[in-house]
């Protein structure tokens, strides 16, 4: 079944499974059935946070970062071995000690492809294949539970396990639509409940909605009027219902709207960062498409300059219109250029939250999405560029989640464990 | 005859090499300029040696701009004006910005001529002063060590006994030595990268990790490859630093026009393959293309460290192939950079992995 999915998609979905389930260290179905997926998910999660660094010398700091990503000290060794296996890292040892971890995490090519390839090599089981497929299916559009089940061709018991794993990780959720049918949807791509999408689906064909979502995802922050795959009527309805998330720049003349795909399942503080990231990218898109002079040619470079220099390199006359939104959101401030009348400089408020928002904006620009762990954990808290430990570990309130297990599944797990206890060799 | 001359000029060469190295220059050995001509269509191209360059120095600035310097060292009675005019010509041919003419004693008329041609003149006394002012006596690594230099020279080339003829495999190896010593210096960097990768994958079975001659050849190959990659990164940084991925693609195939031509050729070959039902698609990009792009990207984004890669490689060769295997931090002192070392290892890993060379050839580097 996974043959239908690209390697890159598999790598990304594996990371989502790990990040969704990382709070549940002792969740039996995960331990029993998701070995390859969780392993690759952990590798992906760590690689995402180490990307851009040349090496890490301070192993303690690496342990600290890993623990925040749901990778225990004991697991870090095997994860590093996997990173070596896929040629993303080399562990340099001096005697029995780790001297340094040299990193080669791809920055220009898509590293998820390599991760997806490795997942396939690890021979994942039927449940893992099905779990990845279900998540990918319902993340693109909500589907009836019965349809998903029949498409996968799984028996009741296996399907229940797949759903238990996905729902426990808050990757898939159930929704009773008009009390008639159980709908499966993914909080990763739906904010709140899927009513809006389903209502929209009554007016427009499903493939129309899916292609619009794919287009927006591939060009996050696309100006409303430049969306190619849809007509104005569809877009206004999608925005009104909340299927597409708009960011408006009201200081621009005329007022402009920039579109983003929805993202659910976030905590309040994570949502704040995501909204800041969207606002930043919308402003850059405004300069890319609507600046009267010197349009932005390289949006990524502009974002990196702001992140690294905490200001834009040159003053411009249109900063108040283009970046006014960032001033109202307390991301930065604008000051007149003393040397050039009618020109302004833009400065970033250098806070960890704003820097993280810029990183997320770069992710959205480049890949259309950002892993949830990027919203939760900042590698800079642990690793300076030279790889040394810096500061204390950030404390984070854990979400209180319960595992989702039916009586039958609980019984099965207990039976399996008792077999092991009796000494059955498998 | 050439060996005797080499011996005679060696002390001067080694001293200037040390002086340049202390100022951040990488000074490759075995640099010879040749001309290739086709005398007979049935014969391969014939090499005619123009001259060898005594010392070539290449330095990259922290923003990847490069400076090249050529030094001519003479201890005999050659005509000074002749050598100075010759040096100016070689500098122009190579695109070197600076030249140094070294002789034990230099006459005043030669000094006046050299200064008109923007060439610096140094005699023995001048060298002494320069060495002192650059504090070379506290340089932690001895890049001008005559014993090491002799060892390096003795390991360069194939070993054929007097009464024997070279074997078929030795002749193939000879081609690689030949390329690195002569052809490399007159070929574009994008071709050099591809040719070095190709040549070393051809000779991988002939190189053994316990053979010092093999090891030295592999490390010189790595040095040349690294030099070409850094130059390519330098060109990309000059052209358009904002879009490294696109610029790398263009540079790797020698420009937009050549890229288009190559794409057309590959398309035609694939069409032919389809007609012949070969079921194999040829890709334009070689297997190491993606990793090379990542390396170039890293060099550009970490340029202030990356410009030290070649000197780190020099230190690794001197200390770990021929020296006392001191830790690199100690051997390089303040010049040491972990980022540069990690980047050096990354280039070596790509070189080893995609040519299929024995991992043991880079064992010294792996543990650093």
Image (cartoon, coloured by chain):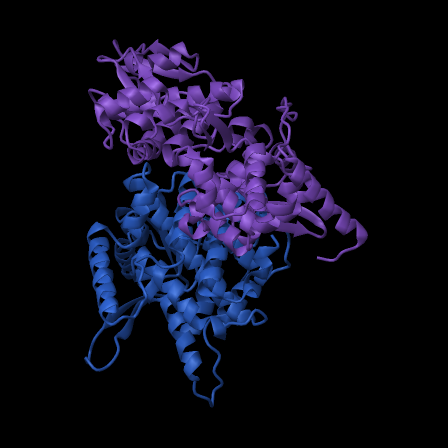
Residue positioned 26% across, 24% down in the render: A234
Vertical comparison of A220 with B206: above or below: above
Q: In this view of the protein, which residue sits in the foreground, B166 or A97?
A: A97
Q: In this view of the protein, which residue sits in the foreground, A144 or B58?
A: A144
Relative side of A177 to B113, left or right: right
The furthest residue to the bottom: B163
Vertical comparison of A116 with B216: above or below: above
Q: Would residue B345 be visible to someone looking at this image?
A: no
The chain coloured blue carries which letter?
A: B
Residue positioned 55% across, 58% down in the render: B318
Q: Position of residue A227 (x, y in %)?
A: 25, 28
Q: Position of residue B95 (x, y in %)?
A: 28, 52
Q: Position of residue A243 (x, y in %)?
A: 36, 24
Q: Would residue A289 be visible to someone looking at this image?
A: yes
Residue positioned 46% across, 62% down in the render: B220
Relative side of A305 to A132, left or right: left
> Which of the image's four quarters has the C terminus of chain A?
bottom right
Q: Quadrant of residue B191?
A: bottom left
Relative side of B306 to A32, left or right: left
Q: Position of residue B282 (x, y in %)?
A: 31, 63
């Amino acid at each position: 079944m996974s043959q239908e999915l690209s390697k890159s998609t598999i790598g990304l979905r594996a990371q989502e499974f790990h990040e969704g389930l990382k709070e549940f260290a002792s969740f039996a179905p995960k331990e029993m059935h998701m070995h390859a997926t969780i392993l690759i998910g952990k590798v992906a999660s760590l690689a995402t946070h180490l990307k851009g660094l040349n090496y890490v010398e301070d192993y303690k700091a690496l342990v600290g970062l890993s623990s925040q990503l749901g990778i225990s000290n004991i697991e870090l060794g095997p994860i590093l071995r996997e990173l070596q296996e896929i040629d993303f890292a080399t562990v340099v040892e001096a005697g029995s000690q780790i001297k340094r971890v040299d990193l080669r995490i791809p920055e220009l090519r898509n590293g998820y492809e390599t991760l997806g390839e490795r997942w396939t090599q690890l021979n994942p089981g039927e449940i893992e294949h099905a779990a990845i497929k279900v998540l990918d299916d319902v993340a693109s559009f909500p589907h009836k539970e019965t349809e998903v089940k029949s498409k996968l061709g799984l028996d009741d018991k296996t399907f229940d396990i797949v759903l238990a794993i996905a729902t426990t990780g808050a990757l898939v959720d159930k929704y009773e639509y008009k009390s008639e049918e159980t709908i499966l949807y993914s909080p990763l791509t739906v904010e709140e409940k899927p009513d809006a999408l389903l209502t929209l689906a009554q007016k427009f064909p499903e493939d129309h909605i899916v292609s619009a979502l794919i287009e927006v995802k591939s060009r996050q922050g696309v100006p409303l009027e430049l969306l190619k795959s849809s007509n104005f009527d569809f877009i206004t309805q999608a925005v009104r219902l909340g299927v597409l998330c708009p960011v408006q720049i009201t200081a621009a003349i005329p007022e402009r709207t920039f579109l983003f795909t929805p993202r659910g399942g976030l905590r309040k503080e994570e949502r704040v960062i995501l909204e800041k990231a969207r606002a930043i990218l919308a402003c850059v898109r405004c300069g890319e498409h609507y600046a009267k002079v010197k349009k932005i040619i390289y949006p990524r470079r502009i974002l990196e300059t702001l992140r690294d220099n905490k200001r834009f390199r040159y003053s411009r006359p249109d900063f108040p219109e283009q970046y006014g939104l960032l001033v109202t959101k307390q991301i930065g401030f604008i000051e007149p250029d003393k040397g050039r009348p009618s020109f302004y400089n833009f400065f970033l408020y250098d806070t960890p939250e704003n820097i993280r928002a810029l990183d997320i904006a770069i992710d959205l620009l480049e890949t259309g999405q950002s892993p949830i762990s990027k919203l939760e954990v900042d590698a800079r808290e642990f690793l300076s560029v030279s790889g040394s430990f810096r500061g204390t570990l950030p404390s984070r309130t854990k979400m209180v989640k319960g595992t989702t297990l039916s009586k039958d599944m609980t019984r099965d797990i207990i039976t399996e464990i008792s077999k092991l206890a009796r000494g059955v060799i498998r | 005859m050439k060996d005797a001359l080499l011996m005679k000029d060696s002390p001067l060469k080694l001293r200037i090499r040390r002086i340049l190295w202390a100022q951040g220059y990488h000074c490759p050995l075995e640099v010879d300029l040749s001309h290739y001509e086709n005398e007979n269509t049935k014969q391969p191209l014939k090499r005619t040696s123009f001259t060898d360059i005594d010392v070539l120095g290449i330095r990259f600035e922290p923003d990847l701009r490069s400076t090249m310097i050529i030094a001519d060292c003479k201890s005999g009675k050659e005509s000074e004006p002749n050598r100075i005019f010759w040096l100016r010509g070689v500098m122009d041919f190579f695109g070197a910005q600076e030249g140094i003419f070294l002789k034990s004693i230099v006459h005043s008329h030669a000094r006046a001529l050299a200064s008109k041609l923007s060439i610096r003149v140094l005699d023995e006394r001048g060298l002494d002063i320069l060495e002192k002012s650059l504090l070379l006596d506290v340089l932690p690594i001895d890049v001008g060590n005559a014993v090491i230099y002799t060892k390096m020279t003795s390991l360069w080339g194939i070993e054929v006994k007097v009464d024997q003829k070279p074997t078929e495999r030795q002749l193939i190896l000879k081609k690689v030595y030949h390329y690195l010593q002569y052809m490399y210096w007159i070929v574009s960097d994008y071709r050099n990268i591809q040719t070095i990768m190709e040549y070393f994958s051809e000779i991988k079975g002939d190189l053994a990790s316990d053979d010092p001659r093999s090891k030295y050849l592999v490390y010189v190959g790595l040095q040349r490859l690294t030099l070409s990659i850094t130059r390519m990164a330098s060109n990309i940084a000059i052209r358009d630093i904002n879009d490294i991925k696109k610029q790398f693609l263009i540079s790797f195939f020698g420009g937009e026009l050549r890229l288009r031509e190559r794409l057309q050729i590959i398309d035609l070959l694939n069409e032919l393959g389809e007609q012949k039902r070969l079921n194999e698609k040829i890709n334009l990009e070689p297997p190491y293309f993606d990793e090379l792009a990542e390396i170039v990207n890293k060099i550009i984004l970490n340029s202030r460290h990356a410009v030290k890669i070649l000197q780190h490689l020099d230190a690794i060769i001197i200390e770990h192939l021929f020296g006392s295997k001191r830790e690199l931090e100690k051997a390089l002192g303040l010049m040491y950079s972990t980022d540069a070392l990690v980047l050096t290892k990354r280039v070596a890993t790509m070189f080893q992995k995609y040519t299929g060379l024995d991992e043991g050839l880079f064992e010294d580097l792996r543990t650093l």
